[in-house]
Structure formats: C-alpha cells, structure tokens
Amino acid sequence: MFRKNKYIKRSHLSEAKFRVIIYYFVHDLPASKIAE
C-alpha cells in the first residue's frame, strides 16, 4: 500500500523531487550536490 507523503502538502516540490532530496539525505551527500 502506498502512503501519501504528509510533508509534501505544504511544500512547492513535486513528489519526485522530494524523493530525490530524501535519497541524497539518506546517502549523506553534500548540500552542494543536492542543490544542483
């Protein structure tokens, strides 16, 4: 079952972009890489 992301509601990010940010965060990549 897919659960809707509760953090995406108030942000201006798409679900896909949010997942990419979380992916980078989990893999501990530098903020400069995330900003690209």
Image: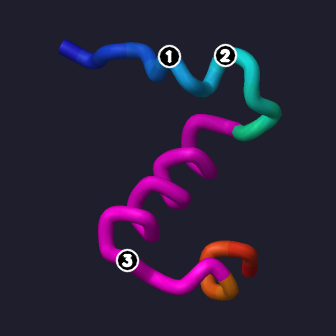
Position of residue 5 relative to residue 16, above or below, is above
Marked residue nearer the N-terminal end (1 or 3): 1
Residue at numbered disc 2 = 9
Residue 24 location, x and y as percent? Answer: 45, 69
Position above or below: 13 against 23: above
Q: Is residue 5 left or right of residue 2?
A: right
Q: Nearer the viewer, mark 1 or mark 3?
A: 3
Question: Dot 2: what SS?
Answer: loop
Residue flagged by tag 2: what amino acid is it? Answer: Lys
In the image, residue 19 lies in the stretch drawn in magenta? yes
Element at label 3 = loop
- At horizontal 73% and vertical 75% (from top left) the residue drawn is 35
Mark 2: few/some/many CA within 10 Å (<14, 14-19, 20+): few
Mark 1 → mark 3, Cα distance in angstroms: 22 Å
Q: Which residues are magenta?
A: 14-31
From the viewer's perspective, tell me whether residue 1 is left or right of residue 34.
left
Residue at 75% of width from left, 29% of height from top?
11
Residue 6 bears which disc, if any? 1
Query: In the image, 8: left or right of 12?
Result: left
* 25 versus 35 height, above or below: above
Tell me, yes or no, whether the two marked residues, 1 and 2, touch with CB atoms within 8 Å.
yes
13 within the magenta span: no
Structural distance between the alpha carbons of marks 1 and 2:
6 Å
Badge 3: residue crowd in 10 Å (few <14, some 14–19, many ≥20):
few
Q: Which residue is mark 3?
A: 28
Q: Quadrant of the N terminus?
A: top left
Q: Earlier in the sequence, mark 3 or mark 2?
A: 2
Instruction: Name the image quarter holding the C terminus.
Output: bottom right
Looking at the rendering, which quadrant does residue 23 occupy?
bottom left
Q: Residue at x 48, y 49 (%)?
A: 19
Residue contact at pointers 3 and 2, CB within 8 angstroms: no
